[in-house]
Image: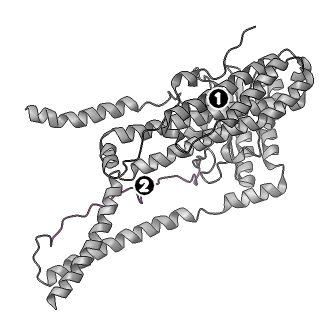
């Protein structure tokens, strides 16, 4: 009995440890990524939402950048700067290769707005430029209670900033449109590698059987292969009708404002 | 004849087993320590990178403020001196596992944060300065950098916590004992400093 508890003790201790260290910095809860416009605070009518969605879709087709408008009823006592980058990472807006996501976050109850810029777009949509867009296009409208107008003007100016430099834009669109040749190829390589190993293994054991060496290991049971090399990597590319991020990274670029 | 084929087959089987074994070992965590170590180092480079960016922005900021508020020379020289001290701190290669050096680095950067905070507070008293476009741009860049610093620090804290937990808990502890005896626990930022981002200044 004592031996049994001792044996059970280790896993229990480990479990306790992992549970204890697991909670990171308390993350707020985020709305679901239901589309390019996530209007959790209900500021927009259905038509406005559709119009904005079309505009944002056009931007992605043109420049490969993902811009998402999100309104939240509450920031849950998190500074909007912290909320913003965590939300960006949570949704993975932008592609993992280019990190080209942008969020326009509006928190009407806290009277805060933020443009959160993915790492890859920081040199284009700089902090200063984000600040100028917030101060000039968004806040004057918000101060008069015109959320729809402020959001629309903000989206227009962010789009302008992202598509302003034509040569740079073309290069970026090319880069974004190029299929990710790397990943699938690597996956297939790994599959071939493991199939080859299995075949070799079977061949070796059948040879040793045929030559009459009785080693007791002739009939080895199922071979268990480690998983992580291949097969995992379930990253939905967001084709089909729905919209999803591509795993873009956020490091705190952008600017915030309040009214 | 039989002996030689047996020998060759034995060697061949051994190769197969080694390949299989290395695959299985990768599945049960033999690579976790180096992976987490590299991740923590990358997070640290990001911290350094953002602190450097802040240091690069300061001379411009000081020049701009000087144009409007030259009489605040004490605050201005404080910032310049704190910046000089922060950029002069020698960063030894083993800083992450060297508590002394790590503490020194932190203190220098915190000093600079304090001096910078005081400078930004006095700028509130100069309406002309506040409406200067150049200053506004600098200010938003500086705010952005402070924001990036705090995120980079937080990412570093998480990465180091994962790494330190790994080398102190069970499968990682064994792997460390067998294969990575030089994997030392890394230094981390303390939570107290994390909460006091910019010191409060009252007049």
Q: Quadrant of residue B203?
A: top right
Q: Residue at x 45, y 46 (%)?
A: B36
Q: Mark 2 belongs to which subunit?
A: A
Which residue sits at x=81%, y=18%? B74
Helix, strand, or loop for circle 1?
A: helix
Q: Counting other residues with Cα less than 10 Å from the Cα at mark 1, is it few (<14), some (14-19), or many (20 or more)?
A: some
| Depth check, front residue: A218 or B69 | B69
Tell me the magenta residue range: A219-242
Task: Measuring from the top left, give residue B109's x and y in whole percent.
Answer: 65, 29
**Whole-percent x and y of residue A184?**
51, 64
- Secondary element under disc 2, as helix, strand or loop, is loop
Is residue A137 visible in this depiction of the protein? no
| Quarter of the C terminus of chain A within the rendering | top right
Q: Quadrant of residue B56?
A: top right
Query: Which of A61/A98 is in front?
Result: A98
Q: Nearer the viewer, residue B177 or B139?
A: B177
Judge depth for marks 2 and 1 and give the one in front: 1
In the rendered structure, the answer to whether residue A26 lies left or right of residue A18 reads right
Q: Quadrant of the N terminus of chain A?
A: top left
Q: Residue at x 72, y 9 (%)?
A: B202
Name the chain under label 1. Answer: B
- Magenta stretch encompasses residue A188: no
| Mark 2–mark 1 CB contact (< 8 Å) | no
What residue is pinned by disc 1?
Answer: B108
| Residue behind mark 2 | A232
Residue A248 position in % (x across, y down): 61, 47
């Amino acid at each position: 009995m004592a031996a049994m508890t001792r044996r059970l003790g280790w896993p229990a201790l480990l479990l306790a440890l992992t549970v204890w260290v697991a909670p990171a910095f308390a993350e707020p809860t985020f709305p679901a990524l239901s589309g390019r416009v996530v209007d959790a605070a209900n500021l927009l009518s259905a038509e406005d939402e559709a119009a904005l969605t079309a505009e944002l879709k056009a931007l992605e087709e043109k420049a490969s950048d993902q811009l998402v408008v999100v309104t939240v009823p509450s920031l849950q006592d998190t500074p909007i700067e912290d909320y913003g980058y965590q939300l960006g990472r949570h949704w993975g807006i932008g592609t993992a290769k280019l990190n080209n996501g942008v969020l326009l976050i509006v928190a009407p109850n806290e009277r805060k707005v933020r443009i959160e810029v993915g790492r890859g777009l920081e040199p284009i949509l700089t902090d200063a430029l984000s600040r100028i867009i917030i101060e000039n296009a968004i806040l004057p409208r918000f101060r008069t209670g015109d959320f729809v107008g402020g959001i629309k003007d903000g989206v227009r100016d962010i789009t302008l900033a992202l598509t302003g430099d034509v040569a740079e834009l073309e290069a970026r669109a090319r880069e974004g449109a190029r299929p990710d040749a790397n990943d699938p190829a690597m996956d297939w390589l790994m599959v071939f590698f493991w199939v080859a190993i299995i075949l070799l293994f079977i061949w070796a054991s059948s040879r040793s059987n045929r030559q009459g060496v009785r080693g007791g290991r002739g009939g080895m049971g199922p071979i268990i292969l480690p998983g992580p090399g291949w097969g995992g990597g379930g990253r939905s590319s967001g084709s089909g009708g729905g919209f999803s991020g591509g795993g873009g990274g956020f490091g705190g670029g952008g600017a915030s404002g309040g009214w | 004849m039989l002996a030689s084929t047996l020998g060759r087959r034995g060697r061949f089987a051994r190769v197969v087993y080694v390949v299989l074994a290395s695959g299985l070992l990768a599945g049960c965590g033999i690579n976790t320590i180096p992976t987490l170590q590299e991740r923590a180092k990358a997070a640290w480079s990001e911290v350094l990178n953002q602190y450097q960016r802040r240091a690069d922005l300061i001379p411009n900021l000081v020049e701009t403020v000087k144009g409007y508020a030259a009489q605040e020379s004490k605050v201005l020289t404080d910032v310049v001196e704190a910046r000089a001290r922060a950029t002069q701190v020698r960063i030894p290669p083993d800083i992450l596992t060297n508590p002394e050096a790590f503490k020194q680095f932190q203190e220098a950067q915190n000093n600079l944060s304090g001096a910078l905070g005081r400078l930004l507070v006095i700028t509130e008293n100069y309406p002309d300065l506040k409406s200067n476009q150049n200053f506004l741009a600098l200010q938003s860049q500086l705010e952005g950098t402070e924001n990036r610093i705090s995120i980079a620090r937080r990412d570093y804290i998480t990465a180091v916590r994962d790494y330190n937990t790994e080398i102190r808990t069970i499968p990682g502890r064994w792997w460390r004992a067998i294969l990575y005896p030089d994997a030392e626990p890394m230094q981390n930022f303390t939570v107290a400093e994390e909460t006091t981002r910019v010191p409060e200044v009252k007049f």
